[in-house]
């Protein structure tokens, strides 16, 4: 059975000020997604799917082509596939505004991978570090995931995912008895030096212990028809002429849950998430990765 790591890498990290997905942040210039790939392969994943812009394929081959020479934990060759997120996958009934340059968000991204994902999958952001234990936990859950109506998510504490350098967008979760009950997209969360956190868009304080989604989802292939239906409804009823409208996975998951079509189990990881939302976050992330290499959590080279 192929268990895929699906990496959403088509974005350019506008707030970060460049392509943070290909920033050599590790001690040997490893890019952040290489840690996710390394952790996933040693957990048992045997396929990697990159969701990229078409013009990024040559660059991705240069950066990650070595994966084709690697062997998965089950002894099989690691399979690598590309999915392209562009306007060619948008249904003909929708007229794309002339001023729009960006694709339509994370639901659109995952939907673009429908033809190359042939088993359970873990979906992640390219520019986040999720931790070694998170992939082990996710892989175990995916191998037991029923075909329909079930999904999994690794949750993180809000206090460990915010930045002092500006606001962040997070899926704020309500969890009961290990099940996700709701997820609300909060687009402007600010961390302050005293540790308090505030949702500026709704002008309310948030608990540092709030569980949030960092787009670390586990799905069965049956999610793709639901994605297609939801995305088409979004284009028909919400997108309109808004050139910045995005169709987001946490919102889609919440919609499916409220409709009684999806149950999501929330998994927990002993590891700490970190990522680069702003350029000022880079030094902290580089220092954290160096400590992990120095402790032996990662080998000297991830590409060997």
Image (cartoon, rainbow, N blue to C red):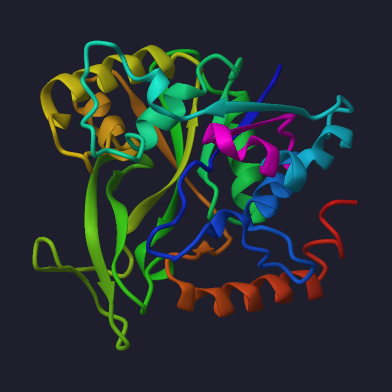
* Residue 282 pos. (x, y %): 55, 74
Observer-nearest residue: 295 or 21?
21
- Residue drawn at (64%, 74%), measured in percent from left and top? 286
Q: Residue 292 appears at what percent x and percent y?
A: 72, 70
Can residue 129 be seen in the rendering of this structure? no
Q: Nearer the viewer, residue 180 or 288?
A: 288
In the displayed structure, does residue 123 sit left or right of residue 25? left
Image quadrant containing the N terminus:
top right
Q: Give the vertical position of 285 relative to 233 (above or below).
A: below
State whether residue 213 appears in this view. yes
Q: Residue at x 53, y 43 (%)?
A: 9
Q: Residue furthest bottom?
A: 194
Where is residue 220 shown, x and y percent of the image?
A: 50, 20
Could you say where residue 126 lies in the image, as x and y percent from the top left?
55, 48
Q: Give the residue drawn at x 60%, y 43%.
A: 137
Q: Which residues are magenta?
A: 43-59
Asked which quadrant contains residue 94, the reply is top left
């Amino acid at each position: 059975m192929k268990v895929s790591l699906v990496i959403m890498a088509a974005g350019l990290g506008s707030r970060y000020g460049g392509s943070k997905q290909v920033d050599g942040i590790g001690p040997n210039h490893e890019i952040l997604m290489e840690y996710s790939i390394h952790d996933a392969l040693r957990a048992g994943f045997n396929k990697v799917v990159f969701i990229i812009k078409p013009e990024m394929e040559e660059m991705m081959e240069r950066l990650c082509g070595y994966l084709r020479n690697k062997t998965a934990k089950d002894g099989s060759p690691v399979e690598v596939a590309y999915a392209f997120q562009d306007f060619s996958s948008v249904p003909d009934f929708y007229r794309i505004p002339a001023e729009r340059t960006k694709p339509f968000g994370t639901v659109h991204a995952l939907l673009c991978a429908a033809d190359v994902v042939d088993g359970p999958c873990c979906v992640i952001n390219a520019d986040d570090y999720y931790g070694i234990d998170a992939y082990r936990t996710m892989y175990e859950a995916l191998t037991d995931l029923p075909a329909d109506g079930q999904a999994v998510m690794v949750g993180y504490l809000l206090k460990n995912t915010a930045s002092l350098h500006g606001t962040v967008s997070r899926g704020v979760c309500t969890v009961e008895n290990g099940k996700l009950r709701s997820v609300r997209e909060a687009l402007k969360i600010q961390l302050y030096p005293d540790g308090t956190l505030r949702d500026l868009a709704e002008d309310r304080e948030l608990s540092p212990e709030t569980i949030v989604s960092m787009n670390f989802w586990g799905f069965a292939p049956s999610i793709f028809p639901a994605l297609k239906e939801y995305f088409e409804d979004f284009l028909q009823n919400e997108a309109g002429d808004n050139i910045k409208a995005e169709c987001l996975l946490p919102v889609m998951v919440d919609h499916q849950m409220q409709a009684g079509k999806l149950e999501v189990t929330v998994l927990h990881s002993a590891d700490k998430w970190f990522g680069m939302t702003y350029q000022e976050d880079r030094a902290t992330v580089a220092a954290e990765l160096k400590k992990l290499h120095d402790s032996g959590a990662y080998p000297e080279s991830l590409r060997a």
